[in-house]
Structure formats: structure tokens, C-alpha cells
Image (cartoon, rainbow, N blue to C red):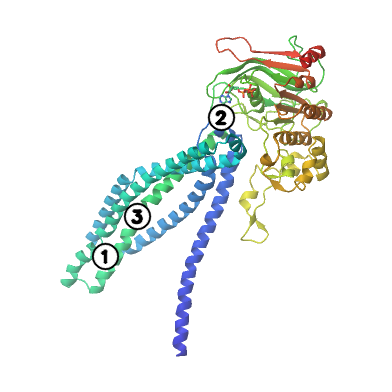
């Protein structure tokens, strides 16, 4: 009795262990897939955020929804690729084991089975050939729909002010309907394929028994061989019919591969050359050599002996795709403490000039040279201390003569729309000069970290890369006082609480926060695109005074007359005439008298 109970227990334990094996196998597969995804995600993200590829993709609308490709496609690629490989491996082992059995019993049965499966595969491919495209479109449409919802969340206040809920609802419904219609097509195609697959699966079940039974009745084989042949037959049928049985999953997988392949090609091409690949381009360089100080009667070069910061030579700037000329043959130079105001009618190309200076646009021709260090150099010496070494072309792509990453912290750009990062107030202030290294804890190892994410080569290491000490809490508090938004510290309970800053701060406060970043970063040259447009004149004057006191030279774009008071020259760009070869700009010194007249008007 006891022995029987023990034997039963042992059998139960044995069965349980057998099933535990499957649990462990699935766990191992999922873990492997997760790690693979982790590596691929950091690999794709790193290339996406290098060389401003994200900007090129977005501004030139090169591919749809890169975010969805990084999140969803990579996830389903890694998990499906692994489970397919295991399925293929199992099928191969199964096929080898059972082919021999079936072939020994009755070779023609084996041949019939092979022909049947080849025929089935051809018909499935024919019936389901539209599924890949439909799956590709489904991914795109679902992502478009989700992006529409994200935009509503991001622009909640503007939509609420406009009272645009009904329009938003219609736009979102359009996107959803489009996804729904495509999914309906997908379901119909899948249904047709499924009809065939079911027929294919059951039609042939009877064949092995029907073929082998007569052999049993004629005494050629034993009864057990019939069962053996049926079992071997169905195993081999499953193995050689993988394409037929899994066609829907395979078509979804190929859609994912197509989307990722397309994305991968874009990321690769962006690395080797510009995505637009024009014949002519603007040559942007960062140099350690002091610029020559040629005096020019038209005011494009100031008569000073201060160190040179920027040279713009014969710059003709065009829009990226339409190739229409915005600025023709522009030349000017900026020395230290030489503050330039850029004015002109709306749409004349003022922001585009800044885009060219930042290296975001290179369509056109001419040369831009910054005489400052690029990011990652040792702590900046003053310009007068700069050694007259040969031109620094380290950040210029030799092959194509284009900047690889000229995001020098000696030159600081403040864009027209203030940008608030996701995070705490401290992170807002440290952005973009300092950043904390990403360390993601590995839940499988207490206190461990995932190696793939921490080894991203591009992640900035504060202490080594910038060698400028990270501002302390006191520095951050002080700079908030300097830009007159010290009060937000008590309102938002210190520097380390996380809010949706673009929603809880007014536009003017966001602009002052952007100036706080600038003052902390202490660049040599700041390029400001209507960066005080939301501020009152008193605050505007205060911020310009702070910049001057910090020894920052600046180029500003703006429409306000009050801005003339903080600049010594003005570059006036007029709208370019497509038929004319004349230059459409002029540059003048701002005389105090002229200034007073202006301000009086
Ligand atoms: N990505 C783009 N592709 C093609 N054309 C563009 C692109 N971005 C802007 N433009 C066009 O380039 C022209 C100049 O734009 P830009 O933003 O430089 O004007 P702006 O002088 O700064 O105007 P505003 O004073 O209104 O800000 C505009 O006609 C604009 O439509």
C-alpha cells in the first residue's frame, strides 16, 4: 500500500517536473527575448538620437512613426524571431525522427505527403499574399491613431482654448476608422486563408490509414504499424506545413521586419551621408584658429580687435525640399561682445539662418566657422588663451565634409518654442549641458544593472565629458533667482519634484527657465530665437543685462523695437525675390541716436 502510494507520488512528482521544464523553457526564452530587445532598443535609440537623425526624419517626413517602430516592432521582432527559431528547430528534429519511420513503412506515402505540403504552401502564399501589406498598414494606422491621442494630451490647453474637441474627435475617429477598415480587410483575408488551412489540415487525415490498412489485411504489416504510420504522418505533416499553419503569424512578422528594415536603412544612411544628400551644401566647421579680422565698410565685420567667435562667408541658404532661396550671399562676422540683432518680415528666413548656424539645415552653399571648442573638449579656456592650432575638423565628416555633431556647449541655441524635458526642475536646469547616466536595475539580480543600457557609448558622463562641475543646489537656486523665477521653488516643493513643466509654467516662465539653463552653461556665444517674446520689457531687459554680465556674446532674432537697446548691430533680412540675383540683406551698426528715435516711435 505504502509502496503503491510512494510510486504514485513519484509519478506525480515526475510529471510535475516534466511540466516545470516547460515553464523553465518559456522563462528562458522570454528572458532571452527581453535581453535581446534591450540591446536592440538601445542600439536603435542611439542611432536615432545621433547626428540629429530624429530631426531629419521628422522635418523631412521620411518615415512614419519611428517611436512605434522602436517600441512595438522591436518587441514583437525579438519575441517572434525567438519563438519562430525554436519552432523551426523543433520541426527539423521532428522531421528527421519521423521521416525515417514513415519512409520505412511505406515510401510512396512519404512522397504523397511532401507533394501535398508543397501544393498547400503554394496555395497559402497565393491566398495570403496581401496579408503582409495589410499587416504593414495596420501597424502604421494603429501608430497614427495613437500619435493623434498623444498630440491631444500634449496640446490639451490649446485645444481646450480653441474649443476644438469636436474637430479632434472627428480627426481621431478618421484615424481609428482607417485602422478599423484595414483591420476588417485583414480579418477577411485571414478568414479566407483559414478556410483553406482547415480544409488542408483535415482532408488528408484519412490518407495514411486508408493506404496502410490494405497492407494489414493482406498480412504484410501488424496492426500497431497502422497507428505508427498515422502518428508519424501527422507529425511530418505538421513539420512540412509550417508555412501553411503559421502563415498569418509569418505575414505579421514580415511586416514587422519590413518596417524595421526600412528604419534601419534610414538610420544607416543618415550616418554615412545626409538624408537629403544635396550636391551643394553649407560647410560648417568648429575651429581653434582665431579668425582674421578684415574690416568691411558695410558693417558686416565690426572694427574691433576682440577675439573672433563666428565667421559667415558667402552664405546662400535654401529650404531643404523646395529649394527656394531664403538668404543670398550673406557674409558677416561676430567678435566677442559684438551682439547682433536679426530682423526681417515673418517668413523671410531668420529662424532658418539659425538652423544653418546650428547645422540643422545644410541646403545652400557658403561657409560657417565657429571659433570655439566643440563639446567634450577640456574646460574652455578664454578665446585669447586659445592656441593657434590648425583647424579642428574632428567633428566634420571627412567623407562628405559635413558636421557630425557640432553641438558645442560653447555655442548655445535657444529655440523659438521653449522645450521642457520630462523630469524634475533640477533636470530642466541641467539640460542639455549635464545629464545623469542611465542605470536601469536588473530585477533578476538584486542591486544589479542591465549591461546593454549602461554601455550606450553616446551616453554622457558628466564628470568626464564636460569636465565642468555640475552646478550645486545653491547654484541652481541662485540662477532661478537671477532670472526672477525663484518663487517656483516653494510653489513646486523644491528642485526634485516632477511635474509636466510645459503645462504648469507660463510661457514667460518657461522662457526664463531657458535663460537659467543658458546662464548655467556659460557659453561663449548664444543664439536666441525670439527667446523673450513672451516676456514683459522689464524682464527682457533684466535677462539681457544678466547675459552681458556673464560675458556671453549673443545673436538674437526678434521683432520688438526694445531689443535694439541690447545689440550693437542689426542684420535686416528681406524676403528673397526668386528672379533676382541681388543679396536680400543689409547689416548696420545701431547708432544711439537712431536707437532713441526708434524707441520714441
Ligand atoms: N522644414 C521646412 N521645409 C521647407 N520650408 C520650410 C521649412 N521650415 C520653414 N520653411 C519655410 O522657410 C521660410 C522661412 O522660415 P523661417 O522659420 O526661417 O521664418 P522666420 O523669418 O523665422 O519667420 P517668423 O518671423 O515668422 O518666425 C518660410 O517660408 C517657411 O515656410
Tell me if label 1 and label 2 are in contact, CB under 8 Å: no
Please report contact status of discs 3 and 1: CB closer than 8 Å, yes or no: no
Nearer the observer, 3 or 341: 341
Q: Earlier in the sequence, mark 2 or mark 3?
A: 3
Q: Which residue is mark 1?
A: 104
Q: Earlier in the sequence, mark 1 or mark 2?
A: 1
Q: Nearer the viewer, residue 162 or 145?
A: 162
The percent coordinates of residue 366 (x first, y second) are 63, 18
Judge left or right: residue 376 versus residue 349: right
x, y percentage for residue 555?
73, 23
Q: Quadrant of the N terminus?
A: bottom left
Tag 2 residue: 274
What residue sits 31% from the left and 59% below the top? 237
Neighbor class of circle 1 (other Cα within 10 Å; few <14, some 14-19, many 20+) is: few
Above or below, comparing residue 191 to residue 330 in the picture: below
Ligand 1 position by quadrant:
top right
Residue 120 left/right relative to 258: left
Residue situated furthest bottom in the rendering: 1
Residue 258 x %, y %? 45, 42
Describe residue 217's horizontal placement relative to residue 601 as left or right: left
List the residue tagged with mark 3: 245
**Which residue occupies the foreground of this view, 450 or 73?**
73
Identify the secondary structure beneath mark 1.
helix
Depth-wise, is mark 2 or mark 3 nearer the camera? 3
User: Which dot, 3 or 1, sits closer to the camera?
Assistant: 3
Of tags 1 and 2, the one toward the viewer is 2
Q: Residue at x 61, y 61 (%)?
A: 444
Q: In which quadrant of the rendered view does residue 104 lie?
A: bottom left
Identify the secondary structure beneath mark 2.
Answer: loop
Please give left or right for residue 545 compared with residue 330 in the image: right
Instruction: Identify whether 62 is placed above or below 296.
Output: below
Amino acid at each position: 500500500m505504502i509502496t503503491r502510494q510512494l510510486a504514485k507520488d513519484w509519478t506525480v512528482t515526475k510529471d510535475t517536473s516534466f511540466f516545470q521544464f516547460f515553464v523553465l523553457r518559456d522563462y528562458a526564452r522570454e528572458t532571452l527575448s527581453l535581453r535581446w530587445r534591450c540591446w536592440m532598443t538601445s542600439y536603435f535609440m542611439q542611432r536615432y538620437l545621433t547626428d540629429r537623425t530624429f530631426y531629419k526624419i521628422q522635418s523631412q517626413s521620411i518615415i512614419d512613426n519611428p517611436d512605434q517602430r522602436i517600441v512595438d516592432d522591436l518587441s514583437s521582432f525579438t519575441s517572434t524571431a525567438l519563438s519562430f527559431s525554436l519552432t523551426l528547430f523543433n520541426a527539423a528534429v521532428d522531421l528527421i525522427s519521423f521521416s525515417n519511420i514513415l519512409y520505412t513503412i511505406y515510401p510512396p506515402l512519404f512522397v504523397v505527403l511532401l507533394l501535398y505540403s508543397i501544393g498547400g504552401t503554394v496555395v497559402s502564399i497565393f491566398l495570403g499574399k496581401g496579408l503582409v501589406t495589410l499587416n504593414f498598414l495596420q501597424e502604421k494606422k494603429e501608430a497614427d491613431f495613437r500619435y493623434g491621442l498623444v498630440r491631444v494630451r500634449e496640446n490639451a490647453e490649446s485645444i481646450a482654448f480653441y474649443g476644438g474637441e469636436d474637430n479632434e474627435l472627428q480627426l481621431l475617429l478618421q484615424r481609428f476608422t482607417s485602422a478599423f477598415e484595414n483591420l476588417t480587410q485583414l480579418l477577411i483575408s485571414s478568414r479566407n486563408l483559414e478556410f483553406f488551412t482547415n480544409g488542408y489540415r483535415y482532408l488528408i487525415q484519412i490518407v495514411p490509414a486508408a493506404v496502410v490498412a490494405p497492407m494489414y489485411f493482406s498480412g504484410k504489416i501488424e496492426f500497431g504499424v497502422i497507428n505508427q504510420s498515422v502518428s508519424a504522418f501527422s507529425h511530418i505533416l505538421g513539420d512540412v506545413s509550417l508555412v501553411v499553419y503559421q502563415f498569418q503569424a509569418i505575414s505579421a512578422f514580415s511586416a514587422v521586419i519590413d518596417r524595421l528594415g526600412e528604419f534601419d536603412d534610414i538610420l544607416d544612411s543618415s550616418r554615412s551621408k545626409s538624408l537629403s544628400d544635396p550636391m551643394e551644401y553649407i560647410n560648417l566647421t568648429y575651429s581653434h584658429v582665431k579668425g582674421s579680422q578684415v574690416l568691411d565698410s558695410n558693417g558686416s565685420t565690426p572694427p574691433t580687435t576682440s577675439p573672433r567667435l563666428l565667421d559667415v562667408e558667402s552664405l546662400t541658404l535654401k529650404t531643404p525640399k523646395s529649394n527656394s532661396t531664403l538668404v543670398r550671399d550673406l557674409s558677416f562676422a561676430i567678435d566677442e561682445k559684438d551682439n547682433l540683432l536679426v530682423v526681417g518680415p515673418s517668413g523671410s528666413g531668420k529662424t532658418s539662418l539659425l538652423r544653418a548656424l546650428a547645422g540643422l539645415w545644410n541646403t545652400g552653399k557658403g561657409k560657417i566657422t565657429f571659433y570655439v571648442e566643440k563639446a567634450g573638449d577640456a574646460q574652455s579656456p578664454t578665446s585669447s588663451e586659445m592656441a593657434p592650432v590648425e583647424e579642428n575638423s574632428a567633428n566634420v565628416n571627412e567623407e562628405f565634409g559635413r558636421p557630425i555633431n557640432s553641438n558645442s556647449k560653447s555655442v548655445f541655441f535657444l529655440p523659438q518654442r521653449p522645450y521642457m524635458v520630462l523630469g524634475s526642475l533640477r533636470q530642466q536646469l541641467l539640460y542639455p549641458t549635464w545629464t545623469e547616466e542611465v542605470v536601469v536595475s536588473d530585477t533578476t539580480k538584486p542591486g544589479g544593472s542591465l549591461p546593454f543600457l549602461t554601455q550606450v557609448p553616446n551616453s554622457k558622463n558628466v564628470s568626464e565629458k564636460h569636465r565642468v562641475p555640475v552646478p550645486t543646489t545653491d547654484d541652481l537656486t541662485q540662477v532661478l533667482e537671477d532670472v526672477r523665477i525663484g518663487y517656483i521653488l516653494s510653489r513646486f516643493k523644491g528642485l526634485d519634484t516632477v511635474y509636466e513643466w510645459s503645462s504648469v509654467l507660463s510661457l514667460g516662465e518657461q522662457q526664463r527657465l531657458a535663460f537659467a539653463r543658458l546662464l548655467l552653461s556659460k557659453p561663449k556665444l548664444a543664439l536666441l530665437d525670439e527667446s523673450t517674446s513672451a516676456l514683459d520689457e522689464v524682464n527682457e531687459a533684466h535677462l539681457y543685462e544678466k547675459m552681458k554680465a556673464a560675458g556671453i556674446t549673443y545673436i538674437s532674432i526678434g521683432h520688438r523695437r526694445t531689443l535694439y537697446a541690447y545689440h550693437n548691430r542689426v542684420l535686416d533680412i528681406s524676403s528673397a525675390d526668386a528672379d533676382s540675383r541681388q543679396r536680400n540683406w543689409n547689416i548696420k551698426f545701431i547708432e544711439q541716436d537712431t536707437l532713441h528715435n526708434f524707441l520714441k516711435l
